Every structure is written in C-alpha cells, then in structure tokens.
Image (cartoon, grey):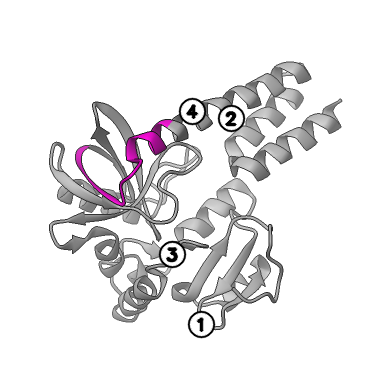
Amino acid sequence: MKEKLIKSALKSYVRTHSVRVCRWTLMSAFLFNVPVAQARFSIMNKLSDDLGKRELCEQALSGFQEKNVQISRTRDGDTFDVQINGKSFGVRMLSVDTPESFYEGHSQGEWATEAKTYLKKVLKPKETVTLQFGRDKCDFYGRILAYVKKGPQDLNAELLRRGLAVNYCVYPEMDRCLKYGKIVHEAKEAGRGLWSDSTTAIPYEWRADVRGTDGAAFVGDIDSREVRSMRDLEDVDVEKRVFFLTRRNFFVGKKF
C-alpha cells in the first residue's frame, strides 16, 4: 500500500511541481501512519484549492494584457500582494529570481534581506504599479505572473541590474530572456550585489539543494537553442539558461 502511496505522491509532484505536497504525503504515511485514503484526500484537497485559486486569478485578469493594480504588501524580493476588485492576489515577478528570505524554514541571509528591502522600498502599500503579462497570467497556485512597471521603470530588470536577482527564464516565456541575460552579464562583470559574494548560491540552485531535487526537467542554452540535461547545468552560463519544467515534447539535444 505504501508503494502505491509513493507513486501517487510522485505523480502529484509531476503535475503540480509542489514538493511540499509530495513531502507531506510521504511523511504522513511513514512517520504518522496516516491511512492511504486520508493521505490521498489531503492531496486532492490541496489540488482542488490550488485550482480554485488559479481560476479566480484568471477571471480577475480576463481580457487584460496589462493592468494597473494597488500594492498591499511585499512578501520577499520577487513576490508581493496586490488588490484587484477588492480581492488579494500574490504576484510573482516573471523571469527573475531573488535569494529566498524564507523557504521551507530556511533563508539565504543577507542578499535575501537586501532584495526584500529594496522591493519594499519601491513598492509601498497603496501605490499603483502596472502588471504586464506573458503567455500565462497565473501560475498553478493562483499567483499572478507579471513584469512589473512603476512609471517607466521595469522593476524586474532593475532587480537584475542591482545584482539583487538572477535571470530565471522558463520556456516558453522567453520574450525578455535575451534582454535580462545581458543585464545579468553586466551585473556579474561589475560585481554588483550578490555577484560580489561568492558564498551566495543562485536562488534556484539553493532551493534544489533544500528540496533535494531539481526544479526543472531540462536546461537550455539560449545561444545554441539546444536542450540539455540538468546534469550539464554548470556548463551553461547563468545568463544564457532557459529552464523546461516538464519533459513533454522535449529531450536532450532537441532544438527549441
């Protein structure tokens, strides 16, 4: 029975990319001896809740390619909350990744604090910003995915320019990959922000270490347009990386 539960949990992880769901299910079975039916109910309840949040998010943004919204609060360096039609939504800034201030009970320390402090400074409560959407407006968890403009300023790019974030390009959202990659290259060369500290891990690599598993199926090189194994991650320059979250329609060596 426990073998079946493991398979169910792993399938849940593949569908949702939710390590927390997978871990909670396995812990329930092995540490607390929770019945299989109860653990499965927990998974389905979590999936239903997330799908409901995504539906609400998509309804709120239906028909918009960009939208002016009011800031509620800052969560960390690349995530904040906004109000739309009286409802609160989280916003995950597209194609950038800042050091984690709190992730599964862990923090990346100084540069996570620096990134959050900067975003909190420029995104004050009740101020208005413009969200510009990519291919998907909402993620599985009901968060808005957006490029963020305050006046004429691209805040996603500014985080990269200051060395407070790395580029995080996820296929097929590639509209600003080259632009953001060039900004990261310049920040690295100048030794700005986290690039001045060799002890600071790249956020998505750090999360993979905390989880014990990669967050993507493949990595690509935006110059060669070739899909590569995650084992080859270090062979692709940070500013040239493109991530593929699923294996569907992709394999090592394929062009994208």
Q: Which residues are magenta?
A: 56-71
Tell me the amino acid under the disc marked 4.
Answer: Gly
Tell me the amino acid under the disc marked 1.
Answer: Asp
Q: Is residue 98 left or right of residue 205?
A: left
The residues bearing labels 4 and 1 have C-alpha atoms spaced at a distance of 38 Å
Which label is found at residue 223?
1
Q: Does 189 appear above or below 199?
A: below
Mark 2 vs mark 4: which is more N-terminal?
2
The answer to whether any part of residue 24 appears in the image is: yes
Element carrying mark 1: loop
**Residue 247 image offset from top left, x and y in percent:** 68, 58
The residues bearing labels 3 and 1 have C-alpha atoms spaced at a distance of 28 Å
For disc 4, the marked residue is 52
Tell me the amino acid under the disc marked 3.
Answer: Thr
Tell me the amino acid under the disc marked 2.
Answer: Leu
For disc 2, the marked residue is 47
Mark 3 vs mark 4: which is more N-terminal?
4
Comparing marks 4 and 1, which lies closer to the viewer? 4
- The question of residue 254 being in magenta is answered with no
